[in-house]
Structure formats: C-alpha cells, structure tokens
Image (spheres, rainbow, N blue to C red):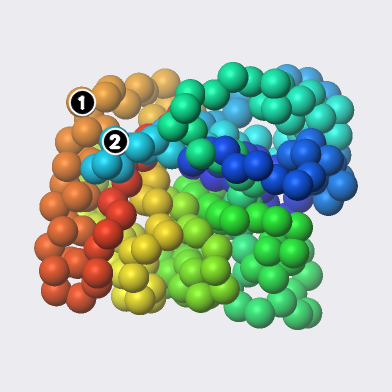
Amino acid sequence: MASMISTNCAQFSGLRRSSPTQSYSQHVNSHLRLVSSRRPRRSSSVVAMASSNKFFVGGNWKCNGTKESITKLVSDLNDAKLEADVDRIEIAAQNSWVGKGGAFTGEISVEQLKDIGCKWVVLGHSERRHVIGEDDQFIGKKAAYALSEGLGVIACIGEQLQEREAGKTFDVCFQQLKAYADAIPSWDNVVIAYEPVWAIGTGKVATPEQAQEVHAALRDWLKNMSQQTLPLKHVLSMEGQ
C-alpha cells in the first residue's frame, strides 16, 4: 500500500513537478544502487486528495527494482506530459531511523535521506508494523524526528482482517493516529495514508465506499483532535493497493 524508498528501495511521490538543475534520472541513478529480481513486480500506489482538491500520488516498489528498471521508469517519468497543476515529482523513502544516525546496523538515517535529496518518508507501513514489529509509539517517535529534520511524513495507519471483523476498525485507526499526535508538534508536512490491511493478500477487496467511510471518521477524529491540541492545516485521505 503506501510507502516509498526504504533502506535500499526507491520510489517516487508526486505532488507537483519542479525544475531541478540536474535531471531526475541523473539524480536518482547517481545515488541509488538497487539489486533485486528482474521479474516485473506489482507496485503499490497511493492516491490522496486534500480539502483543496489537490492530489498526492505515490508509487512503491518495496524491496524490488534494478538499476535497469529504475532508469526506464525515470526516463518515462521525464518524458511524460503532466497536467498544468502538477508541481513536482519527488523521491521519498520507505523507512527511516528513530533518531540521529550512528551504530544502528541495517537502518537508514534521516540525515542520509536528506543528503541524497529525499523530501518524504513513509512511516508506519503495515509491513513495518506486522512483519518487523514496530509499535505505535516507536513509529510516532520516528515521525517526530523526521519532521524535526525537515522531511515530510507519509503516516500510515490501517486495520488487519481480524480487527475489521471484530468491529475494531475505528479503534485501531484512532489509536495509531493518537500515537502520531502524541509525538508530533503539528500536522504540517504530514500525509495520512489509510491502508485497508485486511484487503491485502486475503482475497477480499476494499470498496471505495468502505474506504470513504474510514476517511470520514479519520477527518472527524483529526478535526476534534486538532481543535484541542494541534494546528491542523493539511488533512489528506489516502488509499492504495
């Protein structure tokens, strides 16, 4: 579902396109060396729309991709004709460490991401939660540190199948949101990505109506929360595959 570059995987998030002094292809290929299967993989994607009706689109290759496939992808992106209101295409990351870099084998620091030009990082993805074992509070701390260092955060939330079937969708999502809210000073530069985790690999499909039901509840929760503690400026709803 929602995610971006990880410790070794690349992705692109799209708001609007800028005019970099260096081509996007040169920038990516000069910094990223990706090794994975050459077989085509299904990528994840996320699409978000803010109250201003501006879309945020992200594509995720997880732990896949090669220099060859990324070069072609970037070439296609550079050749694409974009709508007039597409400002920029940016590179993002699928994960970052909870604090300043150091002796943390296997992790990637916010400082390293900034150094190669990343502007965003995905945190709290379902695979980081349920495969790696990151908990809500740890993810909140990661988000706080990334924001403090100037990165935008794609803050993932979502319920598993057993949680949905038990009627705990809102409880789970609100608990995950609260962990972010308790850790970050503001929702500025945060995109909230709702993942219906229960629809991944289960044979079940999340309908637009089901996603919008959760989106509406999230907006209400955020509105109430922001009135009490946080200056809420940007609430984006997000869904993916």
Amino acid type of the residue that numbered disc 2 sits on in the rendered structure: Asn
In which image quadrant can residue 54 be found? Answer: top left
Label 1 neighbourhood size at 10 Å, few (<14), some (14-19), many (20+)?
A: few
Task: Check disc 2 and report its element: helix, strand or loop.
Answer: loop
Q: Residue at x 28, y 23 (%)?
A: 207
In the foreground, 227 or 163: 227
In which image quadrant can residue 10 be found? Answer: top right
Left or right position of 83 against 191: right
Q: Is residue 218 above or below residue 70?
A: below
What x and y, as percent, mark residue 27?
79, 45
Q: Are marks 1 and 2 in contact (CB under 8 Å)?
A: no
Left or right position of 111 against 51: right
In which image quadrant can residue 190 be found? Answer: bottom left
In the foreground, 150 or 167: 150
Q: Which residue is mark 2?
A: 53
Q: Nearer the viewer, mark 1 or mark 2?
A: 2
Q: Is residue 142 above or below residue 70?
A: below
What x and y, as percent, mark residue 164?
26, 40
Amino acid type of the residue that numbered disc 1 sits on in the rendered structure: Glu
Residue 211 at least partly seen: yes
Q: Which residue is mark 1?
A: 209
Task: Check disc 1 and report its element: helix, strand or loop.
Answer: helix
Q: CA distance from mark 1 to mark 2?
A: 19 Å
Q: Which labelled disc corresponds to residue 39?
A: none
What x and y, as percent, mark residue 56?
43, 39
In the foreground, 16 or 183: 16
Q: Residue at x 20, y 26 (%)?
A: 209
Q: Is residue 196 above or below residue 151?
A: above
N-terminal of the pair, mark 1 or mark 2, is 2
Label 2 neighbourhood size at 10 Å, few (<14), some (14-19), many (20+)?
A: few
Residue 124 at least partly seen: no
Q: Residue at x 75, y 47 (%)?
A: 21
